[in-house]
Image: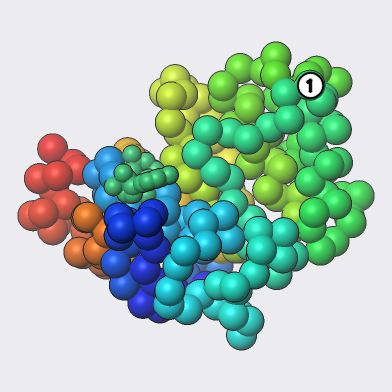
Amino acid sequence: MLNVSKLSASYGAIQAVRSIDLSVMPGQFTVLLGANGAGKSTTLRSIAGLHRPVTGAISLGNREISRLSLHNVVRAGLAMVPEGRMVVAPLTVEENLELSSFAGRNKDADLVDRVYELFPRLKERRKQRAGLLSGGEQQMLAIGRALMTKPQMLVLDEPSMGLAPAIVDLVFEAIVSLHKQGQSILLVEQNAAIALSVCDYGYVMRRGHIVVEGTPDELKKNPEVLEAYLS
Ligand SMILES: Nc1ncnc2c1ncn2[C@@H]1O[C@H](COP(=O)(O)OP(=O)(O)OP(=O)(O)O)[C@@H](O)[C@H]1O
Ligand SMILES: [Mg+2]
């Protein structure tokens, strides 16, 4: 279980995240919604160890992770797919996957096969350089790289951003299938309609605060959510 308690994060004098509480139970698929600049990425980056001017507590299982480096957060079992698909352009698909397996806790030969099963396109392109892949394929590879660390908690920042609708569907099908296999997921997503159709629980952020939370059915009925995100 991921538990975030009274998390605040700042950039100098700018308070991007203001004392938020959120949690993701084992096996749960949780989404974080909010307008541009609400503080969603800062929240994820703080959880993943990429942004350190933070106060509050972040725990994974019974381990406090808010003081750990990115590398040690990954080792503790949390992997993030950041905004903008971080892949190593000159390396092949296969090399990208192998590279991230060294960052994780487990070196497991079956992991690459699991990624290829989830994204058959990556298998077809395994000898191709990552920099030559389409945007959608790079997103699949970025997710694959996170999975190579065998994360207890998978955190994704807007995986659908900039992708054609058909590719968004492919990426979401893969995320839903991971969830069905028991993967715990925390997802930031712009497209509230898609997010609320697949998640178990959601939070809405505005100006650094969490303003609404609930099940997808509750959120879909919430006037504020309806007006801001589903109209
Ligand atoms: N590197 C930075 N330096 C200074 N301020 C930043 C930085 N990154 C983000 N901020 C500020 O922090 C606040 C939250 O930004 P954040 O990127 O977390 O929002 P977001 O909800 O992810 O938005 P988006 O939907 O556009 O991705 C904004 O006011 C933003 O201007
Ligand atoms: Mg963002």
User: Which one is in front, 30 or 76?
Assistant: 76
Q: Which residue is mark 1?
A: 90
Q: Position of residue 78 (x, y in %)?
A: 63, 62
- Residue 132, horizontal then vertical, whole percent: 70, 14
Q: Which quarter of the rendering shows the C terminus?
A: top left
Up the image or down, 10 lies above or below 226; here it is below
Q: Count the numbered circles shown.
A: 1
Residue 99: x and y, percent? 83, 42
Mark 1: amino acid: Pro
Mark 1 CB lies closer than 8 A to ligand 1: no
Task: Using residue 88 as the reference point, say whether residue 38 is left or right of it.
Answer: left
Mark 1, Cα crowd under 10 Å, few <14 / some 14-19 / many 20+, is: few
Quadrant hosting residue 224: bottom left
Quadrant containing the N terminus is: bottom right
* Displayed-image quarter of ligand 1: top left
Which residue is at the far front?
Answer: 12
Look at the picture and state if 90 lies above or below 59. above
